[in-house]
Amino acid sequence: MQAFPQLVFSGVQPTGNLHLGNYLGAITKFVALQDTHDCIYCVVDLHAITVAQKPSELTSNIREVTAAFIAAGVDPTRHIVFNQSQVAEHAELAWIFNCVARIGWLNRMTQFKEKAGKDRENASVGLYAYPTLMAADILVYRATHVPVGEDQKQHLELARDIAQKFNNDFLVDNPAYADGKGFFPLPEPLIQGPATRVMSLRDGSKKMSKSDPSDNSRINLADDGDTIAQKIRKAKTDPDALPSALEGLAGRPEADNLVGIYAALEGKTKLNVLQQFGSGNFSTFKSALVDLTVAKLAPIGSEMRRLQADAPYIDGVLRDGSNRARERAAKTMSAVRDIVGFVR
Ligand code: TYM
């Protein structure tokens, strides 16, 4: 029963080493949605500081993510590109959501468990409350669609639970919302295609990640063509040839991952890729994957470097985007303050 105007929102953390997983799982989707939707893309710097960041590195990582969005094809003039810390309404709504979400809900978040590791007592309170800020990011614009990789699915479910509980708790006796539509939409994750969970190039059972100590485990968006080629040539595989049917990928996580990457970069399905390369020599497929990946990513990497060298331009994009985002967020917060019952 959703009748909210469609709006896309998503965010990427400026924590360095942006990689092929971020690109295929999220950024390519951001680009594709621009023709059909109103879109807001956020560099989530408040999320980044839930773990320690060196201030000067944070600054350059914020510019790196912004440059990556633009180099990949996000248009900051038609849509909104900004950094979270410039729109204080995110933090304000997150506080209200801290009072809506239940401790039991946050205790179930697998990302907190992974990131906090064994030393949970020493994790920041911000890391624990991370998902309520993420819900606020989306809902402060009343966004309806959120393109993300598979790893964010649980956070999106929590955002829906928070929206639902806010609507239930605060609107029951409010005649302005007697139609039952609610104030916040229940945002839908958009997790589609062959590369929603890109795996490490060194270990097909581990997600490709910014924090993996081995740089060979991931292809960074900033890597040049030679580095990309080398990493793919070194990528772990098994001794068998590629199968011609999807079932043949079962139990072969490394092969499955590389086929998924090829399919996503080429805009095809995994089956299409197997039809093209199945039964052939693995090395033939790998060479084609090297060519395709270099052709798609190397130009993005060099455009990123060009944009990053122009900090005044990047900062101007973020300032302009933040001004436009703030206008929208302020409207939501004004209504939220009334709904909660604050005097103003
Ligand atoms: P972050 O910065 O870890 O990742 C950014 C996006 O990249 C996706 N991703 C992957 N996709 C496929 N394979 C992988 N190996 C891979 N690794 C990362 C992530 O799913 C994500 O879409 N919590 C979010 C940031 C965030 C956000 C939001 C997202 C904050 N507020 C509101 C959407 C809406 C995060 O840590 O993403």
Image (cartoon, grey):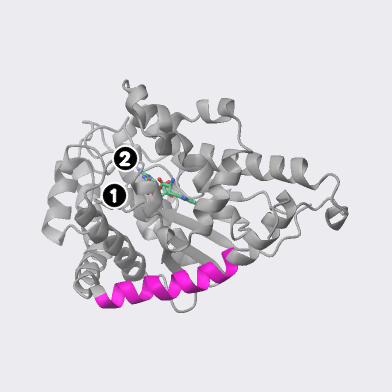
Q: CA distance from mark 2 to mark 1?
A: 9 Å
Q: Which residue is mark 2?
A: 51
62 falls in the magenta region: no
The circle on residue 15 is 1
Q: Position of residue 156 (x, y in %)?
A: 55, 43
Name the residue located 28 percent from the left edge and 53 percent from the top edge. Answer: 18
Above or below, 18 against 164 in this view is below
Name the residue located 27 percent from the left edge and 38 percent from the top edge. Answer: 200
What is the secondary structure assignment of the residue under circle 2?
loop
What is the magenta range? 312-329
Q: Earlier in the sequence, mark 2 or mark 1?
A: 1
Q: Nearer the viewer, residue 264 or 248?
A: 264
318 falls in the magenta region: yes
Q: Position of residue 317 (x, y in %)?
A: 37, 74
Q: What residue type is disc 1 on?
A: Thr
Check the picture and name the quadrant holding the C terminus: bottom right
* Disc 2: CA contacts within 10 A as few (<14), some (14-19) or many (>=20): few
Q: Determine contact: label 2, label 1, CB under 8 Å.
A: yes
